[in-house]
Amino acid sequence: MIEAGTLYIVATPIGNLGDITQRALDILAGVDVIACEDTRHTQKLLSHFTIKNNTMSLHDHNERQRQDQIASMLTEGKSIALVSDAGTPLISDPGFHIVKHLRQQELNVVPIPGACAAIAALSVSGLPTDRFTFEGFLPSKSGARKTVLSALENETRTMVFYDAPRRALDTVEDIVSVLGGDRHVAIARELTKTFETVHSDSAENLKTWLAQDPNQLKGEMVLMIEGAKKDTESISPEAQATLKLLVAELPPKKACAITAEIYSLKKKALYDLALSLK
Ligand code: SAM
């Protein structure tokens, strides 16, 4: 089942070791070598499953140097597994440069899917999952964090971030100041581990909740922010009814101008709605 000349991108657990797949175990046991973000860390995982295999390091600092070596090994017919310390490699973890390089050379790269903290968190957050954006790690300094949040002010999709729980209170304070206290925020901490906690509330309430319980500032965390309301969602039912009547009699531009005047609304938001009513 192991194909020669293939790099396998193998997801490993994000806490609970029971979350590794049978296919991942077979690949880790059967490849010629396992490229690890941290060989000692992966050795513990391998020992737990009594797998003995060769390892080599592949981390942020040597990834580009390793790419030719890995390409040559694959060309010679070797099979390699790539793992990070936890979860899916390449997702805020090393591996992107290697995969890009191998794809350019039309070498075989195969995913062995499994745990990913962002997806696990989103699946239990209660926030919309039909469209979302993964934003990676939030900056650790408040100024840079606020800049990132400001740039996402009008993002309507659910936003998923990795963040350190020890910064969670500061981050939520920044969310309150940049996006407002009403915005819904969910945190998923220590997923699949003993102290797994998932909590969601308005940013303002979440701030109070975090401030009251220092235990919530430990471990690992995914933070998710509800998307901005679409402009049309802030148009009252009365304004929508008026626009509907006017749009049936007048050109959309005129209908919007009158409705905007009566209800003190922005013409742009009304125009999108008017077109959908036409
Ligand atoms: N590649 C990994 C994945 O697929 O999730 C993510 C690696 S990134 C370096 C590590 C970050 O993922 C942590 O700082 C945290 O934000 C998140 N994370 C990892 N494990 C987690 C867990 N068990 N519970 C909550 N967040 C977790």
Image: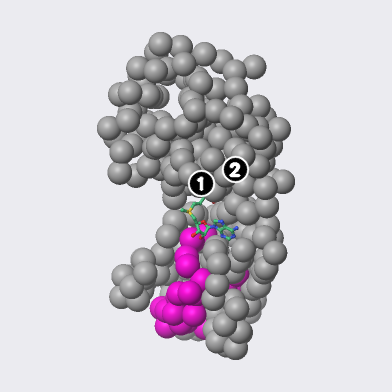
Q: Quadrant of residue 46?
A: top right
Q: Residue 41 — which label? A: 1
200 sits to left or right of 99: right
Q: Is residue 85 above or below residue 169?
A: above
Asked if ligand 1 lies within 8 A of label 2, the reply is no
Element under disc 1 = helix
The residue that appears at 59% across and 76% down in the rendered structure is 216
Cα distance in 3D space between marks 1 and 2:
7 Å
Q: Closer to the camera, 273 or 141?
A: 141
Residue 195 in sight from this viewpoint: yes
Residues rendered magenta in the picture: 160-186
Q: Residue 215 — which label? A: none
Residue 238 in picture, x, y percent from top left: 63, 79
Residue 233 in sight from this viewpoint: no
Q: Quadrant of the N terminus?
A: top right
The residue that appears at 71% across and 32% down in the rendered structure is 22
Q: Quadrant of residue 268?
A: bottom left
192 sits to left or right of 264: right
Q: Is residue 161 above or below residue 30?
A: below
Residue 197 in picture, x, y percent from top left: 67, 69
Q: Quadrant of the C terminus?
A: bottom right
Q: Count the numbered circles shown.
A: 2
180 sits to left or right of 194: left
Residue 209 in picture, x, y percent from top left: 61, 84
Q: Label 2: which residue? A: 45
- Whether pointer 1 and pointer 2 mark residues with C-beta atoms closer than 8 Å, the reply is yes
Element under disc 2 = helix
Is residue 164 one of those drawn in magenta? yes
Amino acid type at image mark 1: His
Residue found farthest to the top: 76
Q: Quadrant of residue 178?
A: bottom left
